[in-house]
Amino acid sequence: MEISESAALAASEVRVTFGRLRRRLRAVASTTDLTPSQESVVSRLDKTGPASASDLAVAERVRPQSMAATVAALVELGFVERTPDPGDGRKQLISLTTAGADRLQGDRQVRQEWLATTLQERCTEAQRQTVIEALALLDEVTQA
């Protein structure tokens, strides 16, 4: 299948724009200097619940040693805690603490507020509706 020029251009523009938006949103909410891998682990634990370090390493596609360092840093910050796995006493489960959940929620709120304010200030109502429609189309693409 030959890819049209417009499809290639759209793909490039979407990728570049979403990358820039992702970096900007991270910068807006960086109240604590978490690494991207630490942010990812905190977010994953929020979405999926407690997990072993080895399960997190597999899910995040990193070496177990790298995950151990990430978890240790998050424990030190008080964002996660280790508890014995009730199903296997040899393992420990990594869980999000209240401080970790609060940090995550705070970051999400800051990012949401920044983006809403920026869209309000820089776009007309018609442009915001266009953004909503374009994102609906991109959502359809992700369902394919």
Image (cartoon, rainbow, N blue to C red):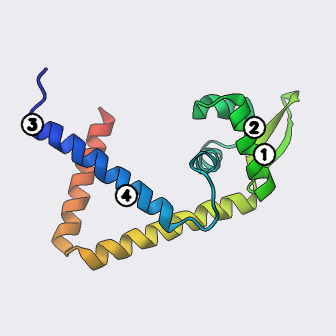
- Left or right? Give the position of 144 relative to 28: left
Q: Amino acid at mark 3?
A: Glu
Q: Residue furthest bottom?
A: 121
Would you name the residue on which mark 1 appears?
72
Image mark for residue 68? 2
- Left or right? Give the position of 65 relative to 10: right
Count of picture labels: 4
Residue drawn at (68%, 30%) of the image: 55
Tell me whether the residue at label 4 lies in contact with that at label 1, contact meaning CB atoms closer than 8 angstroms: no
Would you name the residue on which mark 4 appears?
21
Secondary-structure class at tag 1: helix
- Compared to residue 126, the image places residue 34 above or below, namely above
Q: Amino acid at mark 4?
A: Leu
Mark 1 or mark 3, earlier in chain: 3
Secondary-structure class at tag 2: helix
What's the CA distance linking mark 2 and mark 3?
A: 45 Å
Residue drawn at (58%, 30%) of the image: 61
Mark 2 or mark 3, earlier in chain: 3
What's the CA distance linking mark 2 and mark 1?
A: 6 Å
Tell me whether the residue at label 4 lies in contact with that at label 3, contact meaning CB atoms closer than 8 angstroms: no
User: Toward the viewer: 120 or 47?
Assistant: 120
Residue drawn at (29%, 79%) of the image: 121
Q: Residue 42: horizontal and vertical position, in percent?
A: 64, 50
Tell me whether the residue at label 2 lies in contact with that at label 1, contact meaning CB atoms closer than 8 angstroms: yes
Q: Residues within 10 Å of mark 4 (few under 14, many from 20)?
A: few
Q: Tell me if residue 94 can be seen.
A: yes
Mark 4 or mark 1, earlier in chain: 4
What's the CA distance linking mark 4 and mark 1?
A: 29 Å
Secondary-structure class at tag 4: helix
Tell me whether the residue at label 1 lies in contact with that at label 3, contact meaning CB atoms closer than 8 angstroms: no
Would you name the residue on which mark 3 appears?
5
